[in-house]
Amino acid sequence: MKSLFEPGIKEEIISRMNSLSPGSQPQWGSMDVAQMLKHLKKTMKVATGETQLSQPPWYFKLMMPFYRSLLYNDKPWKQSLPTARELRMTDPENFENEQRELKETINTFLQLPFPDGKLKHPVFGWLSKEQWGKMQYKHLDHHFRQFGV
């Protein structure tokens, strides 16, 4: 799995993002393209602490070992996976603003310090820089494929 921290990957992601337009249509799911960009931005801001997530139900913790490996392995995510309530986008959004802000958020994410080589995810626990980079790439790739780029 590629990592957002690898050389050239940020440029690949930005190029794919620039291929989107306000009229881009999803191949699955209910978000429009601007909502998808905002969803990606808010998800990346989990790493900076700007997006707060509620604790998952107790039974989710039992399944955690299975879910953690899905975050950064080489297998693509399935379509229409459930997401945290705080990351569901339903309001109309401005495409240009969300695209610009996601680019800024990617740059901020790439500058994050990783004390002791790890950062804590509020749901998935401590993840290494490598795991965060792969998870972020995989999430961006998943939604860009959703919109055909």
Image: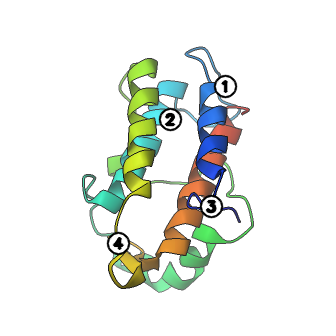
- Asked which secondary structure carries label 2, the reply is helix
Q: Residue at x 54, y 84 (%)?
A: 65
Which numbered circle lies on residue 99? none
Residue 70 sits in quarter: bottom right
According to the image, label 4 marks what residue? 57
**118 shown above or below 89:** below
Are the residues tagged 4 and 3 within 8 Å (C-beta)? no
Q: Amino acid at mark 3?
A: Glu
Which numbered circle lies on residue 6? 3
Q: Amino acid at mark 1?
A: Ser
| Foreground pick, 59 / 116 | 116
Q: Position of residue 64 (x, y in %)?
A: 49, 80
Q: Quadrant of the C terminus?
A: top right
Are the residues tagged 2 and 4 within 8 Å (C-beta)? no
- Asked which secondary structure carries label 3, the reply is loop
Q: Amino acid at mark 2?
A: Met
Mark 3 or 2, nearer chain start: 3
In this rendering, position of residue 10 left or right of residue 58: right
Q: Residue at x 65, y 48 (%)?
A: 141
Q: Position of residue 129 (x, y in %)?
A: 48, 73
**25 shown above or below 5:** above
For the image, the number of numbered tags is 4
Between marks 2 and 1, how big is the CA–CA gap? 14 Å
Mark 1 or 4, nearer chain start: 1
Can the viewer see residue 125? yes
Between marks 1 and 3, how big is the CA–CA gap? 21 Å
